[in-house]
Amino acid sequence: MSNPSGPSHRSVANIRSPVSAQPGAPASPHTPLRTISSTFGSPSALRAEEDCVILELGSRYLRAGFAGDALPKAVVDFGPEEQRRPGDLRRWRIDYKPFEESYVETKGWGEEYELWKPDLRGLDMGLVGDKLDRAVRDAFTKFLLTDSRPRRMLLAIPSALPLPLLSTILDTLFANFQPPTISLMSAPVLATVAAGLRSALVVDIGWAETVVTGVYEYREVQCTRSVRGTKMLGEATFKMLSEAIDLVGTGDKPQDEELPSFDECEEVLTRIGWCKPLKKSVQRSFDRGLTPVVEEDELRSSTRDMHISAKVDEDAAVSVPLSSTTPRRTLELSASDLAEPCENALFAIGTPEKELDDEELPLHLLIYRSLLQLPMDLRSVCMSRVVFVGGGSNILGLKSRALDEVTSLIEERGWDPVTGRAGEQLRLNTKLQRTRPRQDGPTEVLRLDEKPGTVTIPASVQEQESDPIEGQLKREASKGTPPVEAGYLRAVESLGAWSGGSLLSQLKIPAISIVEREQWLQQGISGASRSGESNSSSQRQSMGPGAFNKTGAGDRSSWTLGLWG
């Protein structure tokens, strides 16, 4: 038996929990209530709050997916097959021919397959909004499999997108999908991020034009463009196939039903289209110490053992079956014929440079002039980080041909913007070059240890004496820092603008411009403040010495469209 006179802390009565002072609480022992965190709530509610939908919008395709993914889940095109009414099931018929309505091009090459064109005159903005609404809705319901809850959006668009078109896009997204905010980011900058770089020369071989953008520290510093793009390349492929059909036929001009369709021309270009290598062999020099030739030697030895030749047989015949023509036929084309559209459309072979307009420069000349317009320090960094993106960059042999052409131009002209016969005569005339100092002026006083006739080098030209202490400090500061690749041509692969937007959104990096739904519905595009009107007292927020800073981050009442405002 227990001793009632024992210590009070050993009493059985003290073991019971004290009565709660809260009113309404049960007096008997009970399981304490647990507060369930919102982290362990409904997955759909969490996904709706935290997820951000990444949209990359081009003139022909829409890419959509969630932030954090490496690749988009949906790639939707704007072709005629995607614009049929709901319930139109003719494509599932047994006797359905997908090419039956694309024999004659009434408007222009590929205009039925694009969302917009660079020339907005005559473009129906209402139709553009309807096409975009249907494409985004199909991506949400068929590929992303999400509910109708509003989600934040990040929009990757070209930096030169016209303002009326941007207004139509934002009106459609805010009115039909109710996202709380839409972040705007530049596609060339996102392509640079997806390549793992801070600076690059982004060559976007798009549908209607080719755009070369210089990016330095996540900022666009220079942009040039040319009308030579995939649209011109597809039209050249169509002409090549039409001429081959004309030669096979009776000699008369082929009728409309005897010509290949747009879809089949694109399939021929995608499957067997290629670009010839440069005839003049260009040996690229690497001024980096070691020359990376070990992998090339191993590849050459392995291909030699497997009896694989590096030379391309341009006379090899290729059979091209055409199913969209009436009657169906098979063309026998050589490999050189299949490379001719790329030669004419993108590189303008056979056309003198003086006959080319500034807006129709070939690909290699456009890249060279873009590098020439950059400052010297930016040029040395960007030329070693050439990023090819766009649908036209997937053509076999196009990247190496473009780099070889640019290397040939650099060796021929250097970095002198003056070209022509007068500039060449100036470089070759030794009398006009000041290689020696002038003899006129006051008589030079010689030192005691100098002999007459000794050539004196000016102090501005002499090499600087090496300082051992400064050299040691530089070596200590550069320990653990990789060397900067600069001063030579090099191509870098990129995952694309969509992957760059997905990465930045997952890392919570602020965008160039963030548009809120309430402000857009109240003010529209006229409520956006220009960059010069932004509040100067707001703190700059960036992830480095570059862009992605949100102008007016401290003042939510003022907002801007960034590059597009």
Image (tube, grey):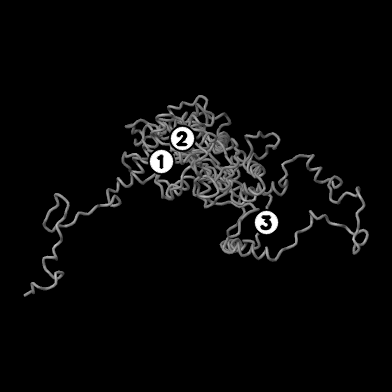
Which residue is at 24% across, 52% downward?
A: 35
Q: How far is the residue under mark 3 from the one under mark 2?
A: 52 Å
Instruction: Single out the mark in the foreground, 3 or 2.
Output: 2
The quadrant holding residue 426 is: top right
Mark with earlier residue (3, 2): 3
Image coords of residue 409 (percent x, y):
69, 46
Judging depth in this view, the residue of 15 and 344 nearest the camera is 15
Instruction: Identify residue for label 2.
Output: 558
Q: Of label 2 and label 1, which has the lower sequence position?
A: 1
Label 3 is placed on what type of residue?
Ser
**Residue identified by numbered label 3:** 285
Which quarter of the figure has residue 215?
top right
Residue at point 75% right, 62% down? 465
Upstream in the sequence, badge 1 or badge 3? 1
Category of crowding for the residue at label 1, using alpha-carbon neighbours closer than 10 angstroms: few (below 14), some (14–19), many (at least 20): many
Regarding residue 85, the answer to whether it shows in the image is yes
Residue 41 in the figure: left or right of residue 542: left
Q: The disc labelled 2 sits on which kind of residue?
A: Ser
Q: Which residue is mark 1?
A: 153
Amino acid type of disc 1? Met
What is the x, y in percent for residue 408? 69, 48
Q: How far apart in space, not on screen, are marks 2 and 1 (Cα)?
A: 20 Å
Name, please, the residue furthest toward the top.
122
Kind of element beneath mark 1 = strand
